[in-house]
Image (cartoon, rainbow, N blue to C red):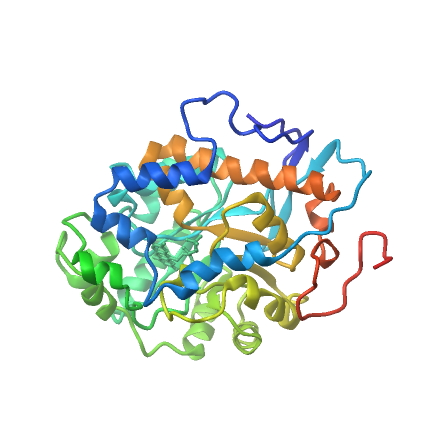
Amino acid sequence: MSAEGRAGERKSPSADGATAGAPELPATLDEFFDIARERLDPGTFGYYAGGAGAEITLRDNEQAWARLRLRPRMLVDVSRCETSTTVLGEDLAHPVCVAPTAFHRLAHPEGEAATAVGAERAAAPFCLSTLATARPREVAAAAPAGRRWFQVYVFRDRGVTRALCEEAAESGFRALFLTVDVPFFGRRERDLRSGFALPAIDVPSLAAAVGEPGASLDMRAIGELLDASLTWRDVEELVGTSDLPVVVKGVLTAEDARRAVASGAAAVVVSNHGGRQLDGVRASADALPEVVEEVGDEVDVLVDGGIRRGTDVLKALALGARAVLVGRPVLWGLATAGTAGVERVLRLLVDDFALSLALCGVPRARDLDRSVLERPPRGPSVSSVDGSL
Ligand SMILES: Cc1cc2nc3c(=O)[nH]c(=O)nc-3n(C[C@H](O)[C@H](O)[C@H](O)COP(=O)(O)O)c2cc1C
């Protein structure tokens, strides 16, 4: 495994740092994707992989990171690289976190418990979805030392949401990530084609919202359980009633980032829900600069969507994000090898990030700024590492 000393510090990052010791697991995220596609039932694979509409935003999320070009600096001592960051005032060994995604038992019988353990082993915070196939307290019991956050969808039956948030708080979850881009689920054409409907698996939140366990529901029916009347007033209310910091997930504009901060959010996640909601919206990499410019001095800005390589993580931090969330690749890891697959996917990303830092000539992740990017996108003027840009 990678040579980690103090939390976040690594010696001589190497291209194969994550692969030592577990040769039977894939060495690239693309291989995880291929294996998961073979293993999963086609309807489930389409649900995980797909986006909304023509999947323009889904594709653009990855392409937008790839469009950014790097300006590395040479002959900087990178014999030790420091990947650590802070989120919500807490130190993280590295900036790679697990995004909330629904229904992990469709990928692996051990579901979210397996994901949480994989994340714990890779020192990655795990954000548990409201639509999980495990209860918050079960996830906490499976990975007690892991850092965990709880993602909130607000059900029309507010009592269901309140009870879930309370259980999360009692189970050591450290923040509530309120997802604001799902008044309804996007029109996901792969699911319409496949007729994807949730098989009879236990989704505690849905059982509570519907009033009967194990009901087979399609995404439209699930969407109808959510409260589409949510406004910023509800964000203020959640902030006011919760002991946990509230993170607003799903902003794409400076205006909404400002509203989130004015409503008491402790952080925002720049996200288009992995291209699954409104097709044609901007890639999260393209939205990140204006959000950082607007609120980055006041709250932490996180980002997700299309993060597939260490250089994507590096670019996100260079644009001002504190951390990134990774969605689908974690599901591919889970489907391929349960806990070990999740751990491996995360370690591949973290090790690739450490290597990218070294090759970029930036030994400390905290020192990343826009000077490592070729054409700085819109935003405040940049200062290079030695101030000479
Ligand atoms: C299969 C799937 C299920 C998801 N479920 C949720 C969810 O329950 N709650 C939520 O806030 N976001 C959900 N998301 C969005 C992710 O949190 C995240 O924004 C997105 O996956 C990041 O993009 P990436 O998959 O390209 O990394 C889901 C995404 C996928 C792919």
Q: Which residue is drawn at 58% across and 47% down?
A: 95
- Which image quarter has ligand 1? bottom left
For this rendering, which residue is in front, 321 or 146? 321
Quarter that holds the N terminus? top right
**Residue under the image location 74 percent in, 41 percent down:** 363
Image coordinates of residue 99 in percent, x first then y, are 43, 52
Please state if 299 lies on the left or on the right of 263 as rendered. right
Report which quarter residue 292 is drawn in: bottom right
Q: Is residue 329 left or right of residue 258?
A: left
Q: Position of residue 23 (x, y in %)?
A: 45, 22
Residue 108 seen in the figure: no
Total marks shown come to: 0
| Vertical relation: 13 (above or below) 328 | above
Q: Where is residue 97 in the image (x, y as percent from the top left)?
A: 50, 47
Q: What residue is rendered at 87% in x and 57% in y? A: 388
**Residue 353, image x, y percentages:** 60, 42
